[in-house]
Amino acid sequence: MSTKIDIPGSKAVGGFFADFKTFLMRGSLVDLAVGIIVGGAFNVIVQSFVNDLISPVIGLIGQKNLENLFLIMKCSDKSLVCKTGSNDIYPTIAAAALDGAATWNYGRFLQNVIYFVIVAFVMFLVVKAYAKFLDLSKKEEVAAAAVTTKKCEACLEEIHLDAKKCKFCASSV
């Protein structure tokens, strides 16, 4: 004789884990994970493009790397060299921070704006290409589903749309 102990809520927990397993096994979750990983790799490439290639070129104009364009908003009380509103005293943001100065880092902001514009443009191109692909796929489906046959009026058999004579009864169509 077997006795079964019924624990309240055990079926609900089992159902929860079964639903969770089903959720994990769906293909769209794997697609999402791949998209996130590829997006992360793309992020690194675009950041390097902006930081290592574009910013130095822009920095040539101002004789300073774009990342190190900043304005001193407030000097530390202990600083002997800092002047509020200046940006010529410290060569980098790190040097200003080390001296206790509060800085307005507009160069970093400009770098991030450039980064955003590049990512947005690439995403626009990807979405546009995907939409064009979907449009072509739909056109192919419509073309495949297009009427290619007609009925012969004499024998009512299906014949090719461009046929001049029925292959079943030899009547002119």
Image: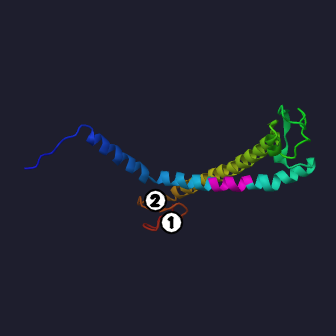
In the rendered image, the vertical position of residue 60 relative to residue 74, given as above or below:
below
- Residue at 79 percent of width and 41 percent of height: 97
Segment colored magenta: 40-47
In the rendered image, the vertical position of residue 63 relative to residue 158, given as above or below:
above
* Alpha carbon separation for disc pair 2 and 1: 9 Å
Provide residue 12's location: percent of width, then percent of height.
Answer: 30, 40
Label 2 sits on residue: 152
Residue 12 falls within the magenta-colored stretch: no
Three-letter code for the amino acid on which mark 2 is drawn: Cys
* Front-lying residue, 66 or 155: 66
- Residue at 69 percent of width and 48 percent of height: 124
Magenta segment's dominant SS is helix
Lower position in the chain sequence, tag 2 or tag 1:
2
- Residue at 43 percent of width and 51 percent of height: 24
User: Is disc 1 surrounded by few (<14), some (14 to 19) or many (20+) residues within 10 Å?
Assistant: some
Q: In what element is the residue under mark 1?
A: loop
Provide residue 84's location: percent of width, then percent of height.
Answer: 88, 32
Horizontally, residue 171 falls left or right of residue 20, namely right
Q: Residue furthest left?
A: 1
Label 1 sits on residue: 165
- Residue at 71 percent of width and 56 percent of height: 45
Provide residue 167's location: percent of width, then percent of height.
Answer: 46, 68
Q: In what element is the residue under mark 2?
A: loop
